[in-house]
Image (cartoon, helix red, strand yellow):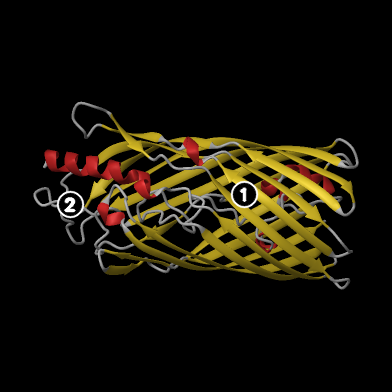
């Protein structure tokens, strides 16, 4: 039994490179949709950053707020992932996943502002079930991620502001795959081998915002990655004993730059480029006492850095109605060689449409998102990963904002 468990753990850890959960099959497991107004504009917001959500998008933008402001929101998404592997079509569970957010900004004077945020910029998950022909590769991959951020911003001149933030992050990762018959290598229907672990990590960010003219603004935000040493255990419905196990985990550095143009009162058009340093995700280690002769099993990822291209426009009427539209293109970060359905990574396109209203001291915003991608994988190291993948996602983002 011990040798069987050892073999399964080795197979399991070899597949971890493709089991990282993702919210929308692109840009790794990054979840950029942290505000309804920003999302409606394709997340082209780093140069605008004029609400409490600037705590996340660009802390330098907090100096634009003249009064204390709180914003509460939620991102609700139903992932639609389908795969055709070895002639069999499989659909992942279409479950509703909800991610809340909360931001607060307090101006200290006309130069200095402080902010705080609670959100989840990484995560969600995919469940392919335990009876598909892909089960020996992955059945479920899920990341629960929570971030608490403190931010400060200072207006150096009337045109130029700087900001910085510090985040404490909690990560809880669940990875599951089916077991293989040790004799034939075929999957055992209904079986599972699961890992779950959690840890706390830290990250920091620096933001700049320059508005030399009322019609033109520029923004930049750089955020460091976080490193985690997950502590948890493995379990199975077929193996006799469970085992403690640890795993290295990370989120990458990211940089966003943007330009905002306001041609007429009420209008705001912005374009952003965001870069994620997935190239730093090379080899991580799984730490376990189950594998004889070693306490560390290396896992190769070799992901590639990727870009997100974002463009959006918004118009606010004199009576306070807000109309917004946006588009963003998310590059894949996983090459065919290391592809597995746990991430089903692909070049993903998002179409975004938002409507809201500002009424005195409060404002609400509702945004609809539709995301789609198609990818054919041929040449993956794991043969059961080769196939055709389609994603059709639907999401709603709601935010309520109050000035005091």
Determine which residue is flagged by label 2.
Answer: 180
Count of numbered badges drawn on the protein: 2
Q: Quarter of the image containing the N terminus? A: top left
185 sits to left or right of 258:
left
Of circles 2 and 1, the one toward us is 2
Q: Give the camera-side residue of 214 and 250.
A: 214
Residue 253 % position (x, y): 57, 38
Please determine whether, in this image, residue 278 is positioned above or below residue 404: above
Q: Residue at x 52, y 60 (%)?
A: 348
Quadrant of the rendered structure where residue 364 is? bottom right
Q: Residues within 10 Å of mark 2 (few under 14, many from 20)?
A: many
Q: Residues within 10 Å of mark 1 (few under 14, many from 20)?
A: many
Q: Secondary structure at mark 1?
A: strand
Residue 223 % position (x, y): 62, 39
Residue 126 % position (x, y): 40, 59
Determine which residue is flagged by label 1.
Answer: 118
Q: Secondary structure at mark 2?
A: loop
Res. 49 visible in picture: no
| N-terminal label among 2 and 1 | 1
Res. 37 visible in picture: yes
Distance from disc 2 to disc 1, alpha carbons, whole Å, reads: 41 Å
382 sits to left or right of 94:
left
194 sits to left or right of 164:
left
The furthest residue to the top: 293
Cβ–Cβ under 8 Å for marks 2 and 1: no
Residue 233 % position (x, y): 30, 42
Question: Can you tell which mark lies on residue 157?
Answer: none
Quadrant of the rendered structure where residue 108 is? top right
66 sits to left or right of 192:
right
Please determine whether, in this image, residue 155 is positioned above or below residue 53: above
Please determine whether, in this image, residue 14 is positioned above or below residue 341: above
């Amino acid at each position: 039994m011990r040798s069987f468990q050892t073999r399964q753990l080795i197979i399991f850890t070899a597949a971890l490179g493709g089991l990282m959960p993702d919210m929308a099959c692109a840009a790794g497991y990054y979840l950029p949709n942290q505000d309804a107004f920003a999302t409606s504009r394709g997340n082209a917001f780093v140069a605008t950053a004029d609400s409490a959500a600037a705590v996340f998008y660009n802390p330098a933008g907090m100096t634009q707020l003249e009064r204390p402001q709180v914003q509460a929101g939620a991102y609700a998404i139903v992932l639609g992932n389908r795969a055709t592997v070895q002639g069999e079509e499989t659909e992942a569970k279409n479950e509703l996943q909800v991610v809340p957010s909360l931001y607060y900004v307090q101006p200290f004077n006309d130069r200095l502002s402080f902010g705080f945020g609670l959100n989840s910029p990484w995560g969600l998950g995919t469940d392919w079930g335990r009876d598909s022909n892909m089960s020996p590769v992955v059945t479920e991959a899920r990341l629960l991620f929570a971030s608490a951020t403190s931010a400060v911003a200072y207006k150096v001149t009337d045109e130029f502001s700087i900001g910085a933030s510090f985040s404490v992050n909690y990560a809880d990762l669940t990875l599951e795959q089916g077991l293989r018959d040790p004799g034939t290598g075929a999957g055992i229907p209904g079986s599972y081998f699961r890992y779950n672990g959690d840890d706390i990590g830290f990250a920091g960010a620096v933001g700049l915002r320059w508005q030399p003219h009322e019609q033109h603004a520029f923004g930049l935000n750089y955020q460091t990655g976080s490193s985690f040493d997950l502590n948890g255990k493995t379990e199975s419905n077929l193996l006799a004993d469970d085992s403690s196990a640890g795993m290295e985990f990370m989120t990458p550095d990211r940089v966003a730059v943007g330009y905002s143009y306001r041609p007429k009162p009420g209008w705001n058009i912005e374009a952003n480029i965001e870069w994620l340093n997935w190239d730093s995700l090379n080899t991580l280690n799984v730490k376990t006492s189950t594998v004889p002769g070693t306490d560390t099993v290396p896992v190769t990822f070799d992901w590639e850095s990727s870009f997100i291209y974002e463009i959006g426009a918004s118009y606010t009427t004199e009576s306070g109605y807000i109309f917004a539209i946006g588009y963003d293109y998310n590059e894949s970060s996983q090459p065919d060689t290391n592809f597995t359905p746990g991430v089903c990574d692909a070049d993903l396109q998002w179409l975004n449409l938002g409507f809201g209203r500002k009424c005195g001291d409060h404002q609400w915003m509702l945004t609809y998102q539709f995301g789609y991608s198609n990818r054919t994988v041929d040449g993956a190291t794991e043969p059961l990963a080769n196939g055709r993948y389609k994603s059709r996602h639907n999401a709603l983002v709601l935010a309520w904002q109050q000035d005091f």
